[in-house]
Structures are given as C-alpha cells and as structure tokens.
Amino acid sequence: MPDLSSQKPPSRTYWLIRLIAMGIVICALGGAWLFAWNWGAGQLEQRADLLTQQLLSYGIELECNNREITGFPFRIGVSCATITSQNIDDGSVAEAGAFRSAAQFYDPGKIVAELDGPARIETFGNVPVIANWEILHASIRASLETIRELSVEARDIAISDGWAPEGTPAMAMAANAQLHARVSETGPENLDLAFKGIDVYPAGEALASLDLVATMTVDEIVPDIRPGFDLERHIRNQGLAGRVANISILPANGGRLEVSGPFSLDTNGVLSGRFEIGFADPNAIGEFLAEFMPSAADAIGTIAALASTMGLSSKEDPQMRIVTLTIENGNVLAGFVPLGRIEPLI
C-alpha cells in the first residue's frame, strides 16, 4: 500500500495553471454569450425595421422615438421614449408614452411589454380622446409565423375629451380591464377572446358602475390578423361570424344580464343571430340599460317585461329568467313578435 504521507501536495504552479484555465473558460463563455446577445440584438433590430416597413405597406406609419435594444445580459427587448402611430389613409394619429418590451434571451417567444400613458388619439372629424392609466402591460406568446396568445391588462383607466378644460370629469373609467386572445382549439383559423372589466363606468360618473365579463369565439379571422389589421375593413370584405359563450353584465345597483348564442355580421355590419338572454332582476337591468341606451329604452323595457312574465327559470340559477331572441338582418324578434331593430354596427 503506498504511503500517502510521503506524497507531495500540488505545487503552486499547478493551482496557478488551473486558475488560468478556468479564467480562460469563463472569458470564452462570456465572450460567446456577448457575441450571441449582440447577434440577437442585431436580429431584433432587423425585425423591428421589417415590422415598420410592413405596417407602412398597410398604410400605418409607426415611429418608435429613441429606439434601443435593451436587457443585456439575460433579457432582450425594444424600448422607445415615446411611440406614435399614424394612419396615412384617414389621417388618424395615436401617441403614447414610453414603451418597453423584454423576453428571456433563451426564450424569445414569450414577450412582456409595458406602455406608459397618457395616450392621445385623434381621428378625422372626431373629438380627440385622451386615455390614461396607472399601468398597462401585456404578455405575448409567439412563434415565427404568428402570435399564439395575447394578454393585456390596464389598471385605473380614464378616457377623457381631448378638448375639454382641465378638471372635466372623464367620459369613461374602469378600475381594471383585461383582454385575452388565443388561437382557438376549435380550429387554427378561429380566435378565442375574453374580456373582463371591473368597476367600469361606461358613461363616466353619470351612470352607476358595472362589472363585465365576456368570452367568445370569432371564426376564420386568424389568417387575416397581421400588421395593420383593420377589423372594419375585414367585416366589409367578408363579414364576421362566431359564437358568444357568455357575456355577463353586473351593474353595481343590482341585477345581472347574461347573453349567449351564435352571431354573424354581413358586409354592411348588419347583425343576425339567436341569443339566450338571462335576467336576474329584470326591472333593475332594464332601468340601467335604458339609461345607458336611451334610444333603445322602449325595446329594452319590452324585453325586460317579457323576461319577468314569460321567461323560463334557469336550472343553474332559479332567480335568472331566460328569453330567447332572434335577430334577422337587424330585426329583433321574440318568437314572431317584432321588438325593434338594431342599426348596422359599422
């Protein structure tokens, strides 16, 4: 058996060589990471330029002021001091504050972004609108071909008249608003949408607040969603169809309204569909909707009365009264009884 006590410990030269080798490896890895990050930054610059050119080809001029690629060493993203978008065709302009986006360098398909307010939106012939918020952020899951999922959340939102004197109450407000979209499991051409609003004041402080939840699927729209997508133009070209899984409106003053059913819009924006409409406390809901939409007060009152007297009780909620309404080319019918007409939506 060898005498371990007689073996000499490694010399200082040995440890020095190991330390130098380790330093070389660390420097090599650091240099490779720096090279890879800078290469990725260059690719991101090219993609940002390409997106700007694509938008311009669709008539949208996008300006990212003081654009920078940020996030080194572990993240990568685009930041702008301010951001401006202009529609060349109609002259509408949207301006907002700083924009920041970031993705993990090793997972660039998952992106988070933030946009600072306020935003000013001007369209030809209309009053400018100022939108402000405490925080607005988004998350995106994307592939090389398309965006697979999108979530946007804003808190403490206020929308104001851009020409109103300072201190004028906001036209609309919400404590929280969320929008979620994803490619539907029903088919790669369909889009699932979900919206949630908490303490929403749709007409400023003139009406009581409400909570709103909506989920729906829109058919055959995903292939057309690209930079410069215009929903109105899409509808005018080929119409729109889908199914409302649920829309729930809960006014703070009481009651609940739920809507579900298939719908379609023709190329003129005329609505057709068959909807199950549920009322909890029809009178309270009728009063709220009549205040919000005075021009439809008579039709709303008739529907609320039908729900109170002829509506079926929901199995899930005995307090909910359900009526079925058919809309044929904008004409609203309860069975064969005409209730009114919905004007084109575009």
Image (tube, helix red, strand yellow):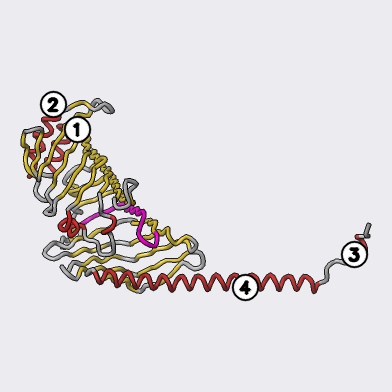
**Cα gap from disc 1 to disc 4, whole angstroms:** 69 Å
Mark 4 or mark 2: name the one nearer the start of the chain.
Answer: 4
Quadrant location of the C terminus in the rendered image: bottom left
Mark 2 or mark 3: name the one nearer the start of the chain.
Answer: 3
Label 3 Cα crowd, 10 Å radius (few <14 / some 14-19 / many 20+): few
- Label ID, residue 310: 2
Mark 4 or mark 3: name the one nearer the start of the chain.
Answer: 3
Residue of label 1: 279
Q: Amino acid at mark 3?
A: Gln
- Label ID, residue 7: 3
Q: Amino acid at mark 2?
A: Met
Q: Amino acid at mark 1?
A: Phe
- Left or right: residue 333 versus residue 42 is left
Identify the residue shown where x is 29% and y is 55%: 222
The residue mark sitting in front, 3 or 1, is: 3
Looking at the picture, tell me which residue is in the foreground, 277 or 241.
Answer: 241
**Cα gap from disc 2 to disc 3, whole angstroms:** 100 Å
Identify the residue shown where x is 14% and y is 36%: 325
Could you tell me residue 68's position as x and y percent?
A: 40, 72
Q: Which residues are magenta?
A: 143-159
Q: Are marks 1 and 4 in contact (CB under 8 Å)?
A: no
Indicate yes or no whether the magenta region holds residue 156: yes
Indicate yes or no whether the magenta region holds residue 162: no
- Left or right: residue 50 versus residue 77 is left
Looking at the picture, tell me which residue is in the foreground, 151 or 84.
Answer: 151
Q: Are marks 4 and 3 in contact (CB under 8 Å)?
A: no
Could you tell me residue 162's position as x and y percent?
A: 18, 62
